[in-house]
Amino acid sequence: MSARSLENRRTPSASLAIDNLRAIVILLVLAFHSVLAYLNFLPTTPYPFDLPPYLWRAVPIIDSKRWFGFDLFCAWQDIFLISLFFFLSGLFVWPSLRRKGVLRFLHDRFVRIGLPCVLVVAFLMPLASYATYLQTGGDPGLADFWRHWRALPFWPCGPMWFLWLLLAADCALAGLRLFAPHSADAVVRLSSWAGDNPIRLFASLSIASALAYVPMALAFTPSAWASYGPFSFQLSRPLHYAVYFVAGIGVGAHGIERGMFAPSGRLARSWALWLTAALTLFSVWIGLSALVMAASGAPSLELQILDDLSFVVACLSSCICVLAVVLRFAGKASAALDSIRTNAYGMYLVHYLFVVWLQYVLLGAELPALIKGALVFCGTLALSWGAVATARHLRWAAGPMIAVDRVRDSRAA
């Protein structure tokens, strides 16, 4: 019997389920970016490369083929996926911080997150954005592209904005641990209060995220972004993400192999209930958002608050639904998911380059949007997975650029 088989036999089902979830969420990320070019609501022409508000940063390639199903799929991911990322990141950060100490923890986080982020933003993002520039009809010369790129009032970071925010959250937690250790312990105890009760978790997180999100959404609108050099973030959501990060810390400190996260716990047993709730609340958010967008002039304050609150509960119900379904059905070892999980972080770092260029190459293909989206996803999965798996075996790539999870406490970066 192989060492990996022995390890899987000894690993609790809850831990295996969370490991498999890390593979699943990277597949969702790849799928999300792969189909952006085929959303039904997009304009008929590409967004201008040189003109504000530079919407090509969100949708780098626009194809003439569309499918409304992709709009629903991307809207669903937009409400919950990054929040789930922060929750999963928080699950393992507290044991790592306690074991390593503040300085070693910060060193490892800067090496694992900060350095790869700098390299990807500096080198891969210009390569990816060159395809966007070409679609807008600019001079194909690299010198001309570089001139337009340097004239932008920011340095596009693509999906790396999430890593910047995650690194900031890690630094804030380390600072709290260093300068106010009793406060840090209190935060862990407070966020562990949900224990093994999913309803209590839903209620407490709903209140906390509503307090964090609704005022920011009213002040800045739900969709506004800010960019400062290579740093970007959605103005309404940093505090909302912080709530999920802290919740993950509390659940991780409580122990994922027992209580609510036990394979036979209340969360796994109630997966059908949470699936129904997620679908229902997502539909409510879709309806209220449509009313906000359809309102002539500025929508009423009451309607905006209802829309923002519907986002809060739709996000949370989808997060809990995914966790429940995974705990119920994905608690077994899988060679394919294990390989994807091992390479997930590297795939996140490099996938955007493949997505954008594959969408650009397929612009002239007379294929349905569903087929194009599937081709981009499969191509991106194969190329990013293969590139990272290959690079992991090269001595020069064994450093921070293709970070490897050597110990369990470093999971879910």
Image (cartoon, helix red, strand yellow):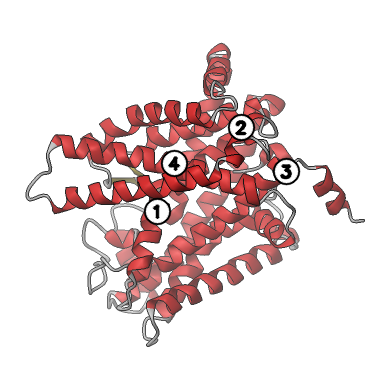
**Residue behind mark 1:** 76
CB under 8 Å between discs 3 and 1: no
Tell me if 29 is positioned left or right of 57 in this view.
right
Q: Earlier in the sequence, mark 4 or mark 1?
A: 1
Q: CA distance from mark 4 to mark 1?
A: 11 Å
Pick whichever, 98 or 63, lies toward us: 63
Q: Earlier in the sequence, mark 2 or mark 1?
A: 1
Q: CA distance from mark 2 to mark 4?
A: 15 Å
Amino acid type, residue under disc 2 in the picture: Met
Please tell me whether mark 2 or mark 1 is closer to you in this view. Answer: 2
Place of residue 290 in the rendered image (x, y in percent of width and height, measured from the top left): 21, 53
Q: Earlier in the sequence, mark 3 or mark 4?
A: 3
Query: Is residue 310 positioned above or below 2 on the image?
Result: above
Element at label 3: helix
Q: Residue furthest right?
A: 1
Place of residue 282 in the rendered image (x, y in percent of width and height, measured from the top left): 36, 48
Q: CA distance from mark 3 to mark 1?
A: 27 Å
Q: Residue furthest top?
A: 182
Tell me if 205 is positioned left or right of 391 in this view.
left
Q: CA distance from mark 2 to mark 1?
A: 24 Å
Query: Is residue 26 positioned above or below 69 on the image?
Result: above
Tell me what residue is drawn at x 59 percent, y 66 percent: 384
Residue 54 figure quarter: bottom left
**Residue behind mark 4:** 317
**Residue behind mark 3:** 13
Q: Earlier in the sequence, mark 3 or mark 1?
A: 3
Place of residue 353 in the rendered image (x, y in percent of width and height, measured from the top left): 49, 66
CB under 8 Å between discs 3 and 2: no
